[in-house]
Amino acid sequence: MGEQIVNNYQLISINQLVRAIEEGRSNSERFCFIIGSGASVSSGIPTGISLEYQWMKEMEETSGLEEIREVAKILENYLENDFANIEKDWEKTKKIGTPLPSEYYFDIYKLRFFPNHRNGYHYLEKIMANKNPGFGYHPLALMLTDGSGSNLVITTNFDSLIEDALFLYTDDKPLVINHELLAEFAGDSNIKRPIIAKVHRGIFFDPLNQPEETKELKGKWHDVLASVFQIYTPIVIGYGGGDNSLMNLLEDSNIKMKNGIYWCYFEQYGLPNDKIQTLIKAKNGYLVRTAGFDATMLAIGNALFPDKIGVHEAEEYLNNRISMQIANYEKEYRKLTEHEDLNKKEHVGEHINQSENDFKIEIEKMVERAIVSEKERQELNRMTVWDYRRQGNRYYNLKEYEKAVESYSNAINIQSNTAQFYHDRGCAYTGLKKYTEALSDYNRAIELNPKFGEAYNNRGYVYDSLGERDKALSDYNKAIELNPKFEKAYNNRGYVYDSIGERDKALSDYNKAIELSPEYANPYKHQGVLWKKEDNFEKSIDFLTKAIELNPKYKEAYMERAEVYRLIGETAKAIEDEAIAEKL
């Protein structure tokens, strides 16, 4: 426990830090985080201090202190600290439980993995393998991606917990700087996505974990971070300053910090060491009393993201994310099982390529296994939520909408917070023209997943069917905002524009839908109808014919073309199209 060096006003609570962050953000202040190994404890990765203890114990038990002293003598020119001091503090640790100073970490690492330090890399890889980000990484990921400009983390850690948290809880992919050769990207304030600057490299990039490697920052890190602190206010969490590289930079009197520095420490262990306190005093910063990384980030999360970090909210988000991934997987699976391209090729010629035939056989085996497996689970009353969804999809494709509603409802009864299931049931209700129920389901899907573009598009269709065109346009606009390549939303919005007399906007949307998906028949049919209303019958027939070429079973397109043929006096062609439409 360190004696107090800082002024009393420089000791603040976590609540005061949170208030400073809130007020700073309202004034466009940008924050960055300096993260050390203390942030990884709840994820099951030991701190540097814990590893110091573990390694000293291992060496003493397997080799004895005498042999450790001999190795220390061999390495004395490569150690930062006199081994006599390390040994003295080690005896104190064993006797009364006080932790070894963090500045011993790199020396003890050197001793523990002598003569081949690469064994140390493998050791670290193993303890970091299969670890998941703890709670605190969720609010951190949200802060890095909320658009406030606080998108930078500087870390001495080798693990990938921050990247994993960003993948789990956000849609943003980080720029991970694993090597000093890429350091200049950390200082680019125009980069909007999260930046993770690993000043000691990543675990797979020959990490810097020896005293001679961590005396100073490599490459351009010094200059880049010096400029960073003119833009960002640093918040230090879980970092004990045990390495000389980053710590020396922070201590450098020439490094100016525009808005000071906040250094979070674990109050249970007392004030930080003299070195850290002297730094805080010199930089006119603040020491923040906390109960650890997770508690600190919980306080920040409660202030900034109260509607996102609760258990229920996180569960809904993760369920929806996984559900969307499974839905996309199923979509690709369905494409394979339908093997449309192979069927087309079989009709074109008598022979099919052998490799394609083998592929088709494998697909058929997979489909057969899936159906048998699902039937077995149904007989045993062990249907999964995704079994019900697949079953619902089959009924929906057969236009057996009542049965589809029942299957989707079964899925919802098992897993009630998944947006995809409500959306799917909304589609089935739409097929039944039960628009009130459909709207309720689409609303719930959007509530669970505000970025669900298909739900906005399909809700827009219901609003249009009810004559609420302003609401329909609003939903189509949102669907396009979320996915600027959503051809169906452009087509549907074009239809609404056409129905309210906005011809130019309708044409623009139909053309955009065709540009995005030239094989999509609907916008051709709609353009055909538009040109019919304009009495441009030639153009109308061209577009309707194209729609029929793309979809030979497009009943409405035949009916519209028949009407145009009658208008221009080509009765025989009109009768032919009407006959085809009747059969369809």
Image (tube, rainbow, N blue to C red):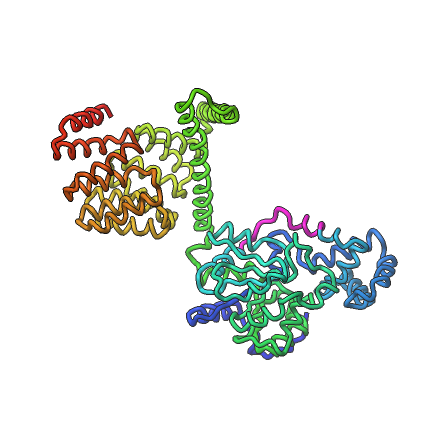
Q: Position of residue 359 (x, y in %)?
A: 50, 27
The residue drawn where x is 21% and y is 27% is 581
Q: Quadrant of the C terminus?
A: top left
The foreground one among 308 and 528 is 528
- Residue 510 lies, with reference to residue 154, above or below; the image says above
Q: Is residue 546 magenta?
A: no
Q: Quadrant of residue 223?
A: bottom right
**Residue 172 visible in the displayed image:** yes
Percent x, y of residue 222? 63, 70
Q: Quadrant of the N terminus?
A: bottom right
Label total for image: 0
In front: 581, or 24?
581
Say whether residue 460 is visible: no
Q: Nearer the viewer, residue 92 or 472?
A: 472
Left or right placement of residue 13 versus residue 68 in this view: left
Q: Is residue 8 above or below residue 498?
A: below
Q: Range of the magenta residues?
A: 122-136
Is residue 129 in the magenta section? Answer: yes
